Image (tube, rainbow, N blue to C red):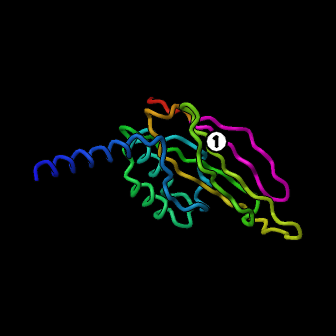
Amino acid sequence: MLWCLLLAILFHAGQLTNESTEPFRIIPIPKKEFGYSHFGSMVLMSENDMDSFLKKTYAQGWNNRQEFEDALRNAKLDFTTEALVLLRHTEGSGSVQVIFETPILNDRKLLCEIRGRPIPPGYLGTADIADYCFAVAVSKARVSQVELQRVEGGFSERRLAPMVFPIIEK
């Protein structure tokens, strides 16, 4: 019986170690939100950084800011080992379908791509601006920088200049 208990403890410890060594995880936040227009892409390295950011966004216009904050808080980020990266994108029409591709880790650089799809021929679009954000928790030990590549959709695709965010303590 003691042998089984020891194996169970070791197996559980191994699972925890494997989970904590993942290089990134996607945090499920609302994809499209007017409030995202109030900030750009950024890296938050600490709980204080996140609290300060959330405090600054409190009085700004949002559709549902509480849902965004709850999603970040429910992610239970461990800022001793993780950084939070918020990746923003704006499309000139709300009818553009926006996709966050699965990030790719190459050496210690995490490549993230947000892609707006072209509007189908014959469709006029909605002509309303749509703001998007995607949240990724990255391992401070496994990721040294995040590169964001964006493609605007609409009537013709246009690749925007890449943005690089270092993952370093202040």
Position of residue 92 in the picture relative to residue 71 (left or right) = right
Point 40% across, 55% down: residue: 73
Return the residue at label 1: 148
Position of residue 134 in the picture relative to residue 71 (left or right) = right
Circle 1 residues within 10 Å: few <14, some 14–19, many ≥20: many
Position of residue 113 in the picture relative to residue 15 (left or right) = right
Bounds of the magenta span? 146-165
Residue closest to the far right: 122
Q: Is residue 56 above or below residue 35?
A: above
Question: Which of 142/96 is in front?
Answer: 142
**Is residue 53 located in the magenta-colored stretch of the structure?**
no
Question: Which of 7/112 is in front?
Answer: 7
- Looking at the rendered image, the quarter that the C terminus falls into is top left
Res. 140 image quadrant: top left
Q: Is residue 5 above or below residue 140?
A: below
Point 79% across, 65% down: residue: 127
Question: Which of 118/39 is in front?
Answer: 118
Position of residue 35 in the picture relative to residue 161 (left or right) = left
Point out residue 135 in the picture as x, y percentages from the top left corner.
53, 51
Q: Amino acid at mark 1?
A: Leu
Point out residue 107 in the picture as x, y percentages from the top left corner.
56, 31
**Is residue 164 located in the magenta-colored stretch of the structure?**
yes
Point 44% across, 55% down: residue: 72
Q: Is residue 21 above or below residue 66?
A: above
Point out residue 25 in the picture as x, y percentages from the top left corner.
48, 49
Point out residue 47 in the picture as x, y percentages from the top left corner.
38, 44
Q: Main secondary structure of the magenta part?
A: strand
Res. 155 image quadrant: bottom right
Point 74% across, 49% down: residue: 151
